[in-house]
Amino acid sequence: MEYLIQNLVTDADVLARYGLTVEEYRDAMPAAIEAARGSMSASNAGRRRFLLDVLEALLAAGLVDSVTKPQYGDDTVYRLAVSGFGSVAIIQKGCPDGAHSSIRWSVPDWARETYLWWLCDSMKAEPGEHIAKGIQRMRSRYLDPTDRTVDGVIFHNHLCGTPKRRCPKQGRAVQIGGQPVPPPCVYVMPDNSTTDLNWAGRQQRFFPGILLGLFGIDQEALPAYLGHVGFQRKNGEVRTTISARFGVGRSTTYRR
């Protein structure tokens, strides 16, 4: 990418399409790069603030005992302590269709359960399409029984429940960080040490009940709001199922 940006200065025809001369591009390029870096940094800070607000709301509600902030880097990992259970890892990622957000992660040794939390600002596709792309990328890791995989994925950011990204769970929204926030989309992932790979959605996890409890969803109502991902080996092929649930009698299923 750096090579492309630097060498565009030699392509007068391309620059002319955007109304620029070689000299104008050369003069403006450093400032434009710095502005883009600043915008990206601000965006990351906003995502971190949203996620931390949600996790601190869990702490304030007494649903977790502590929240340990991460050292920000390649893997941004929050550590939640849950009484009587142990530690839960939340790996902060961006949009799930990129390799960095879907397959480039590692499960901490200290975590009893681990979740990828996708904070995706992109409006190029509906949330379900973003999630499907990420899951398809992740599939190879779940087909390797020696790989330590995450227990679930979460799709949720500050756009959820706003006019830009309307949410069918808006009726369950709570005030977090000064805005109404609906429950996140949570998907239980398979245990890849088993043969059935959660195709029927029977895999049980602990943390989703804690997280969705913040939104007044108790254990009885939980199955109506908890999605799942499963894989199936059949006739030499691998199929994927993604089930999303939005309340009693409201669900969608994608299979490929």
Image (spheres, rainbow, N blue to C red):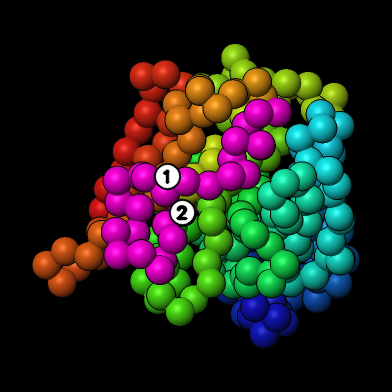
Principal SS element in the magenta part?
A: loop
Nearer to me, 68 or 19 = 68
At x 22%, y 65%, the residue is 233
Please provide percent x and percent y for residue 8: 66, 78
Residue at the spot x=77%, y=51% of the render? 80
Residue 117: x %, y % from top left:
64, 51
Residue 48 horizontal side relative to residue 157, left or right: right
Q: Mark 2 sits on what residue?
A: 189
Which residue is at 63% across, 40% downward? 156
Percent position of residue 56, x then y: 84, 39
The residue most toward the left is 235
Query: Which image quarter is the N terminus in?
Result: bottom right
Please say whether residue 50 is visible from this viewpoint.
no
**Which structural element holds mark 2?**
loop
Query: Residue 201: which disc?
Result: none
Q: Identify residue for label 1.
A: 228
Is disc 2 in contact with disc 1, using a CB cutoff of under 8 Å? yes
Q: In the image, 183: left or right of 230?
A: right
Q: Which percent across, then down, holds residue 208?
A: 59, 40
Range shown magenta? 189-214
Residue 131 on the magenta span: no
Q: CA distance from mark 2 to mark 1?
A: 6 Å
Above or below: residue 9 compared with residue 16? below
In-front residue for pair 105/194: 194
| Amino acid tagged 2 | Met
Q: Quadrant of residue 96?
A: bottom right
**Can I make out residue 222 in this image?**
yes
Check if residue 212 falls in the magenta segment: yes
Which residue is situated farthest in the front direction here? Answer: 84
